[in-house]
Amino acid sequence: MKPFLLVAQREITTRIRKRSFLVMTILGPVLFIGLMVAPTLIAMSSEAEDLNLIVVDHSYVLPGTPSVEGAKLAYFDPKEVSQEQAIALVRERDDIDGLLYVPESVNSDPEFSLKNAKLYTETTAPLGMASELEGVLERFAYEGKLRHFGVDPALVTQAKSDAVIEAFELREEGSEASGTEIKTGIGFVSGILIYMFTFLYAAQIMRGVIEEKTSRIVEVLVTSVKPAQLMLGKILGIAAVGLLQFGIWIALTAAAASAVGAAGLLSPDPAQLEALGAAGQTPPELGELQSVLGTLDALNLPALIAMFLFYFLSGYLFYGALFAAVGAAVDSETDTQQFMLPLTLPLVLTFILSTSIIENPNGPVAVALSLIPFSAPIAMMIRLPFGVPWYELAASMSLMVLGFLGTVWVAARIYRIGILSYGKKPTYGDLWKWIRMKP
């Protein structure tokens, strides 16, 4: 067996036996499922009671006690209750949670009242309550103005129409639903996963190299294995561990998601389904599911998964070689800071520009970022669901392979010198000297 394969085998067996590997392998799916279930459980457990608000409306915009989501309004006659008296009631009575106070209008124009209304509560008002009340005030003020000009608000409501535009993409054999939201979600999630795991596993390579260097184990290893082979074996070994862990996460997450679905935590309300079925309507959840499945069918998921694996591996190998070179050049993890910023900046910048890539996936910025090996793993995965010309994809994949070979060559030259260098904090000049140094 070749020496670098022996090193890779050693990395695999050593890492999968660690407790940290087992703990993270188990916790990963738990965290993913937790993110799926937590919003439902929180919503179920945090259904707060409606606030009891008293209303003192000097503008007479509100007609009695309008319906407001999350609150029950009790209308007090502004001629009998002042602002100070209403605030005192809120402080004194336990059955009153707050006060909505609307000042008098100026020159019969409710504009001043709307812009100076106040909400008083003894505790922090629920998120969105002020916005909900603003909407109610604006609606009734709008209707009041219509009546002032002799227009029946009911006629205006009847004259309104809702427009629904369904986007389609033309194909050679007809057309299909655009599914922009689904494509955006797939591209964004794929980019995030590559961003996270590239940093996670590449950093493991760097820490492993530093650990072996500081413990002087590497001095024993290089007597039987060339430094370049040692570095390549470490990169491939950790890549295999990462893929194994990633595969286990996917399998466990899928199994847990099936269990959660069987338990009904992510299912629609049965009463709602029965009511809609009796009315001959399609439940919104099922309609959305059918739309999602149609979009996924048109996206060619096997090809997307294959591309994800390619850019996941190529991006990891590309950055893994550079991180290994940094680990070999320094004596401690604190010394890596001066070299980490140039390496991580392209990934961070691509992640920041992900919104721009989604908005214009075929624009010059998106195309350029998907061709540069430093940013291609994230940028191309964001673009792929929207459709990428075959020649751009082929060019990007070719440049990724060439980029990996180039970084391995550069990293190997730094590694063979730096792994046995101690006591001096290297500079960029030292790294350049090591790259140029002949074997």
Image (cartoon, helix red, strand yellow):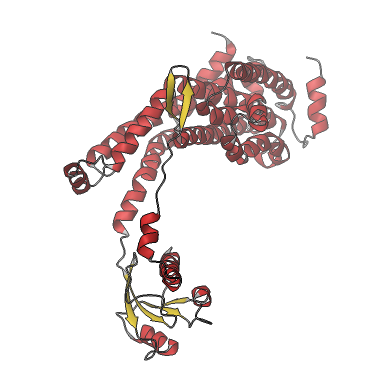
Counting labels gives 0
Q: State the residue in front, 108 or 400.
A: 108
Query: Where is 27 relative to 237, above or below?
Result: below
> Which quarter of the rendered picture does the C terminus lie within?
top right
Q: Residue 108, percent across and down?
A: 49, 80
Q: State the residue in front, 426 or 189.
A: 189
Q: State the residue in front, 14 or 356.
A: 356
Query: Where is 248 relative to 339, above or below?
Result: above
Residue, x 16% and y 43% (percent of image)? 278
Query: Where is 2 relative to 121, above or below?
Result: above
Residue 438 appears left or right of 163: right
Residue 19 appears left or right of 222: left
Residue 288 appears left or right of 210: left
Q: Residue 431, percent across and down?
A: 78, 28
Q: Residue 373, percent across and down?
A: 65, 25
Q: Quadrant of residue 264?
A: top left
Residue 222 visible in rendering:
no
Query: Most extreme residue toward the front, as rendered?
Result: 150
Q: State the residue in front, 35 or 387.
A: 387
Q: Quadrant of residue 100?
A: bottom left
Residue, x 75% and y 23% (percent of image)? 417
Residue, x 45% and y 34% (percent of image)? 167
Query: Most extreme residue toward the bottom, as rendered?
Result: 80
Residue 340 appears left or right of 60: right
Query: Most extreme residue toward the top, as rendered?
Result: 1
Query: Where is 86 relative to 434, above or below?
Result: below
Q: Residue 410, percent across and down?
A: 72, 21
Residue 77 visible in rendering:
yes
